[in-house]
């Protein structure tokens, strides 16, 4: 049994944090239906990620529809993979009037710390049908170095 | 025993639910441009149907060849489906569609009759 210190939420007051967690809860409730579920609290967006542990390697899938390949950034440092980038509107809305605007644009960044060591030199990535796939082979020994991975 | 436990599972599998793809619609001089996000959908999985003044978009995802233990799962893997009502101003014969990196792009041209026309004064 463990003792947990009583911490009234009113005293640990962080309004934005509480708003963010409330929003997360609401998003979870409507996750399957809401089209704008990946719109973040501050206007950013956060793409869906799936991660698999397949004994020899980790495989990450990230839903990034409508991105330009060069605008996807991948970095690996200290066991943490960071996926980031910027999505720009394909159709500049100059002389056009917008009827519906549900897509999210702009910058995003997500990080994932992997549960075991990965060989940074062997990380590969591909982007097809709007899904980024990153393969991270597990390392034989612990290594710590920073590399930048190019999306092929 | 097996038959009893299998039946409800079958029913669950048959209950098809879809994901609504986020969409943008812009108006241009010649028509409308519709963009819909369908990650994981290739050209083969895409279906665009115009019927009775409605536009049906269906995007079926290619099966993911994911193996191993699932550590994080945020995607739903559901197929996409969405219906739009088409106004009479759209020339349904000339609608064109393409999909690039999971983004469906539809061109919905306006019918000639609704385009602004300048009349020459004699």
Image (spheres, coloured by chain):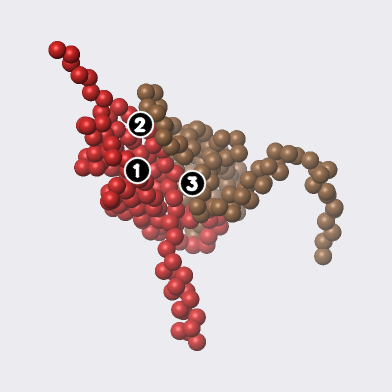
Chain colours: A brown, B red
At mark 2, the secondary structure is strand
Q: Quadrant of the C terminus of chain B?
A: top left
Q: CA distance from mark 1 to mark 2?
A: 16 Å
Query: In the depicted view, which residue is nearer to us: A121 or B36?
Result: B36
Horizontal side of A24 relative to B23 (left or right) equals right
- Residue at 82 percent of width and 61 percent of height: A2
Mark positioned earlier in the residue sequence (1 or 2): 2
Q: Chain of mark 3?
A: A
Q: Which mark lies nearer to you, 1 or 2?
A: 2
Percent position (x, y) of residue A105? 48, 34
Q: Which residue is mark 1?
A: B104
For the residue carrying disc 2, how many other residues have a C-alpha within 10 Å: few (<14), some (14-19), or many (20+)?
A: some
At mark 3, the secondary structure is loop
**Residue A148 versus residue A124 in the image, above or below:** above
Disc ID at residue A35? 3
Disc ID at residue A92? none
Query: In the depicted view, which residue is nearer to us: B30 or B114?
Result: B114
Pick out the residue farthest to the front.
B122
Q: Chain of mark 1?
A: B
Pick out the residue farthest to the bottom.
B1
Percent position (x, y) of residue B79? 40, 56
Q: Chain of mark 2?
A: B
**Residue B38 versus residue A109 in the image, above or below:** below
Disc ID at residue B27? 2
Pick out the residue farthest to the top.
B122
On the question of residue B102 being in view, the answer is no
């Amino acid at each position: 049994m463990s003792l947990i210190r009583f911490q009234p939420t009113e005293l640990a007051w962080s309004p934005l944090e509480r708003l963010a967690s409330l929003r997360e809860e609401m998003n979870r409730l409507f996750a399957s239906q809401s089209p704008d579920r990946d719109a973040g609290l501050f206007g950013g967006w956060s793409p869906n990620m799936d991660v698999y542990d397949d004994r020899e390697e980790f495989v990450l899938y990230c839903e990034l529809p409508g991105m330009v390949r060069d605008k996807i950034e991948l970095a690996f440092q200290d066991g943490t993979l960071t996926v980031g980038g910027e999505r720009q509107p394909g159709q500049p809305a100059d002389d056009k009037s917008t009827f519906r605007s549900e897509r999210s644009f702009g910058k995003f960044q997500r990080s994932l710390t992997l549960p075991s060591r990965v060989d940074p030199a062997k990380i590969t990535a591909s982007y097809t049908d709007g899904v980024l796939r990153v393969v991270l082979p597990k390392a034989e020994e612990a290594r710590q170095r920073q590399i930048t991975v190019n999306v092929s | 025993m097996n038959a009893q436990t299998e039946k409800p599972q079958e029913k669950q599998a048959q209950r098809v639910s879809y994901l609504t793809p986020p969409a943008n619609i812009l108006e241009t001089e010649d028509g409308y441009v519709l963009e819909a996000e369908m990650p994981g959908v290739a050209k083969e999985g895409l279906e665009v149907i115009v019927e009775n003044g409605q536009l049906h978009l269906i995007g079926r995802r290619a099966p993911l060849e994911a193996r191993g233990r699932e550590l994080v799962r945020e995607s739903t893997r559901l197929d996409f489906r969405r219906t739009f009502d088409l106004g009479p101003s759209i020339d349904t014969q000339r609608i064109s569609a393409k999909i690039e990196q999971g983004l469906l792009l539809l061109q919905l041209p306006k019918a000639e009759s609704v385009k602004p026309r300048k009349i020459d004064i004699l």
